Image (cartoon, helix red, strand yellow):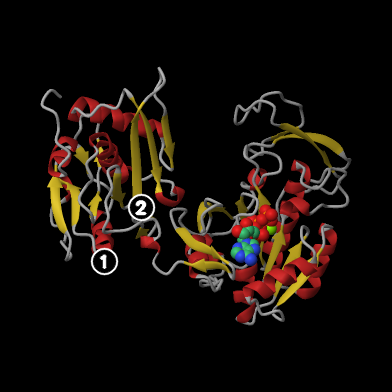
Amino acid sequence: MPKKTASKTEYMCSQCGFDSPKWFGRCPSCGEYNTVSEMKVGPEKETRAWSSPSTHRPMKLSEVPAQGDPRFPSGMEEIDRVLGGGIVPGSLVLIGGDPGIGKSTLLLQAADQVARTGKRVLYVSGEESTDQIRLRAERMGVALDGIWLLTETDLDNVLHSMGEMKPDLAVMDSIQTLYAPDLPAAPGSVGQLRECGLRLMRRAKESGCAVFLIGHVTKEGEVAGPRVLEHLVDAVLYLEGERSQGLRILRGAKNRFGSTQEIGLFEMRAKGLMELNDPARAFLLDLDVSHPGSAVVAPLTGTRPVLVEVQALTCKTAFAMPQRVATGFDQRRLSVILAVLERRAGIGVSGSDLFVSTAGGFALDDPGADLGVALAVASSARNVALPARTLAIGEIGLSGDLRRALDPERRIREAARLGFERAFVPKVSVGDLPTPAPLKIVAVSTLREALDLAGLVVSRDA
Ligand SMILES: Nc1ncnc2c1ncn2[C@@H]1O[C@H](COP(=O)(O)OP(=O)(O)OP(=O)(O)O)[C@@H](O)[C@H]1O
Ligand SMILES: [Mg+2]
């Protein structure tokens, strides 16, 4: 294996992790400016993340011993779903999120659940004192005997403890506080982050211990953030949510063991993060009340749909350039929908400020939500509420036609389960869709037709 024989300086892009022996002003890989940071590479640096004897010669896949599915549950269904069905031994998982969002809480809870199944769990904290962690654990009702706690920032000591204790699960809170003492760079620097990540990866693969790294994200996702680790680890999860509200969403950004479409939903309570029993309902307000500007959509998140309320508010502008503010929805997609509304359905909002937001800040990236957003905007512009318990499914084409959204059947079944009575569905996908009671399907082929049937009368001059 090639080894570097002398310490030298390398340069790395903190945005994408690209490294180079030469300094660069603009990253040749991602094109960002001023993202270069310097790191000292020690003589011990290996070019491979971890070594395994079986990889010294090429072998057929059939020669690789079959292992079955070795996953073990985290004890929290919402985490298991996002991971693709449980924790994979020997995996390295990075969990990022804004300060104070609940990363330590979530992992302490998962650690507790895993420890309760008889597995050995090590929780390494470089940020909080043992007293602080004990206080949190007591508040959350964690079994204090189950988890081994280590307050340490020196990676050598952490690896030593892991070697002695042989845990099944180890949590590093956080990767930014760890440092490899043989590297001159400061903890949290790009060089340290990558080297600590590599060494933990090697240890995870060799020992079979699943390692969870907590990472801080700065607004720009830069140096202090976990981006440089994203290529290295097996899975990257983000814990998101509006801090003022209790709702938290765990989302996969990368997963070598499962889909990244799945989300986990929690609510922050005094006793920690509660898994939501009925996540489909989490982003709905009162089902029976409908206000002008409000519509309900059913974006698919992995294996299950979630019903989300979208709200729009139009208001006469006081500026030459009307404002367009979208929270949880892509601004460019909104511009397209506004253009189609104006040209194909005669509902123009060019003289108004427009605010669009989703309940709980849910990020709507499913095109099947287009129709709902258009109905919400039209409803606000006309100041007419849509009928209550109405769902809108459909992607909007530039000609105002409604296109098939992926898997309408599952969306409809979920809406019916929650008591929805009506669903606008593109005619092309009605086919042999079921009509689970109490839901009735309203087939529509264009946006204009949907607006008409929703009682948002379309002007004749369109
Ligand atoms: N007694 C309490 N009751 C309810 N919620 C609490 C209580 N104490 C703390 N919290 C919640 O826990 C959050 C802090 O959680 P936690 O420390 O797990 O976050 P974190 O993401 O690890 O933060 P950091 O980035 O600072 O490490 C607080 O923002 C608060 O919402
Ligand atoms: Mg924390």
- Please, what is the three-letter code of the amino acid marked with disc 2? Val
The residue positioned farthest toward the left in the image shown = 460
Residue wearing tag 1: 417
- Residue sitting nearer the eye, 298 or 101: 101
**Marked residue nearer the N-terminal end (2 or 1):** 2
Task: Say whether marks 2 and 1 touch (CB < 8 Å).
Answer: no
Ligand 2 positioned in quadrant:
bottom right
Based on the displayed image, in which of its 4 quarters is residue 220 positioned? Answer: top right
Left or right: 327 in relation to 201: left
Q: Secondary structure at mark 1?
A: helix
Residue 179 in view, yes or no = yes
Establish if 402 lies above or below 167: above
The image quarter containing residue 9 is top right
| Residue at image location 79% in from the left, 54% down from the top | 178
Q: Position of residue 199 (x, y in %)?
A: 75, 55
Name the residue tied to disc 2.
308
Quarter-wise, where is residue 94 in the image? bottom right
Position of 187 with respect to 210 (left or right) is: right
